[in-house]
Amino acid sequence: MPGLKEVRIRIASVKSTQQITNAMKMVAASKLRKAQMAIVRLRPYAAKMNEIMQNLSSSMGDSGESVYTKVRTPEKILLVVITSNRGLCGGFNSNIIKAILNLLATTYAEQLKKNNVSLITIGRKASEYFRKRGYNVVESHDDLFDRLTFENISPLAEKLMKGFADKKYDRIQIVYNQFKNAAVQRLVVEQYLPILPLAPDPKASIEKHLIKANYIFEPDQETIIQLLIPKSLRIQLYKSLLDSFASEQGARMTAMHQATENAKELLRALQISYNKARQQAITKELLEIVAGAEALKG
């Protein structure tokens, strides 16, 4: 059994760790409230804009097809990987990295062999992992989380749109964690470009499928589409980053809460160990005193 001094040192160390994890939990909870509010407000707007864009694009037919809706054979692939800049958030980052490795090993195995898969990383954890292992990381934007605003995200969205329009990439996908609640994050592999047509709801009636949205266009449908699509794509990227940031704070808060609880359990076990060691030390001292007294009598 360890001595009293050793147990006291361990108790002090665990208490210090517990204070740190509890402080990190509170910081993450504070950031989560703001991040959750931002993503909850943006989602309905982003979803409706995406629905209108897909509805209008599909109703225009081939004559009004946008450059961003043209489906090409996926020879050149770009994956936008969104992780965090810091760790201590459970499996938040490792799940994203595993999803990318799985995509490269299955869906894009042929393109990877031809060196036709490129990565844009957002977050230091992804940047460090894929650069060290020699993957084709064309850009890293780890500073975006320092000032997460629509204006700062827009230039990257413009680059992605230009890369697809110039046929530098045939398909662009975003891989990130979608925020559900503080304890749950959903891994999402979302197609960014080309824009997919609006998928029909299988639960909806046949009559509902036949109904098309009736919009009044000013100046005309083609012009509206050309303006709407880039704006919608910028919002889509911004939403992905907000989702990831909120998920990160939720994952960190949950991980730090669990670490704090584990520290409490460890402290209980160490306190019991300390009490036993102290009891043994006292008993040993008493026995020595009794033995000494008996020796003096003799």
Image (spheres, rainbow, N blue to C red):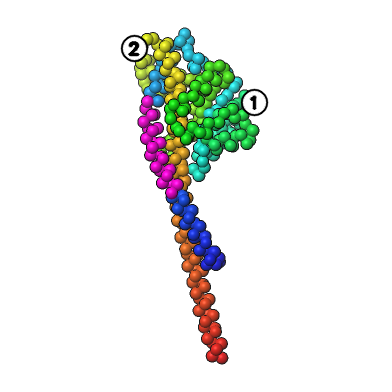
> Residue 259, relative to residue 204: is it above or below?
below
Labels in figure, total: 2
Observer able to see residue 283:
yes
SS at mark 1 in the image = loop
Q: Are the residues tagged 2 and 1 within 8 Å (C-beta)?
A: no
Most extreme residue toward the top, as rendered?
A: 63
Q: Which residue is mark 1?
A: 115
Q: Quadrant of residue 74?
A: top right
- Residue 179: image tag: none
Most extreme residue toward the right, as rendered?
A: 113
Identify the image quadrant of the N terminus: bottom right
Observer able to see residue 198:
no
Q: Position of residue 111 (x, y in %)?
A: 62, 25
Amino acid type of the residue that numbered disc 1 sits on in the rendered structure: Asn
Q: Is residue 37 magenta?
A: yes
What range is drawn magenta here?
23-45
SS at mark 2 in the image = loop
Q: Which residue is mark 2?
A: 216
